[in-house]
Image (spheres, grey):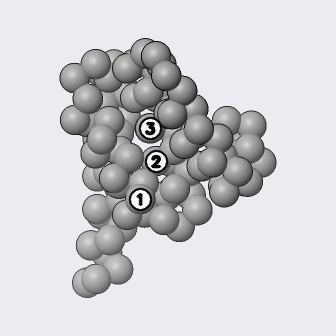
Amino acid sequence: MSKAKKHNHHGAIEDYTMALAVPDTPSEMKAMILYNRGLVHVAAGMAPEGADDLNAVLAMEEAAPNVKSAAHKKLSRIKARKSKRSA
């Protein structure tokens, strides 16, 4: 998270990806990691990758309701921006 706060998007994405690969990481924690990585992808200008992560969060039964809600809101914003650009 500190790399993301410092706008080191590439480093943050790498760290989140490594954290997802840690064996026995609880599913709720994986959902938060995916959500955060999705946000960093979007901040880095990689909205499709961010949307993939956010959709993965929504597909996780174990994800906390507040994390799913936040992912849904962010996806809505991504889609709204995309619509404005293509209009």
Label 1 amino acid? Glu
Instruction: For mark 2, give the secondary structure.
Output: helix
**Residue that numbered label 3 is attached to:** 35
Quarter of image, res 4: top right
Coordinates of residue 19 in the picture (x, y in percent): 57, 32
**Residue that numbered label 2 is attached to:** 38
Would you say the residues marked 3 and 2 are in contact, meaning their CB atoms lie under 8 Å apart? yes
In this orientation, does residue 52 appear? yes
Quarter the C terminus occupies: bottom left
CA separation in Å, label 1 and label 3: 11 Å
**Residue that numbered label 1 is attached to:** 49
Pointer 1: residues within 10 angstroms few (<14), some, or many (20+)? some
Residue at (25, 36) in percent of width and height: 58
Would you say the residues marked 2 and 1 are in contact, meaning their CB atoms lie under 8 Å apart? yes
**Considering only order in the chain, which callout, 3 or 1, is on the residue closer to the N terminus?**
3
Quarter of image, res 43: bottom right
Up/down of 56 relative to 69, above or below: below
**Considering only order in the chain, which callout, 1 or 2, is on the residue closer to the N terminus?**
2
Instruction: For mark 3, give the secondary structure.
Output: helix
Coordinates of residue 68 in the picture (x, y in percent): 31, 30
Pointer 3: residues within 10 angstroms few (<14), some, or many (20+)? many
Coordinates of residue 22 in the picture (x, y in percent): 54, 27
Instruction: For mark 1, give the secondary structure.
Output: helix
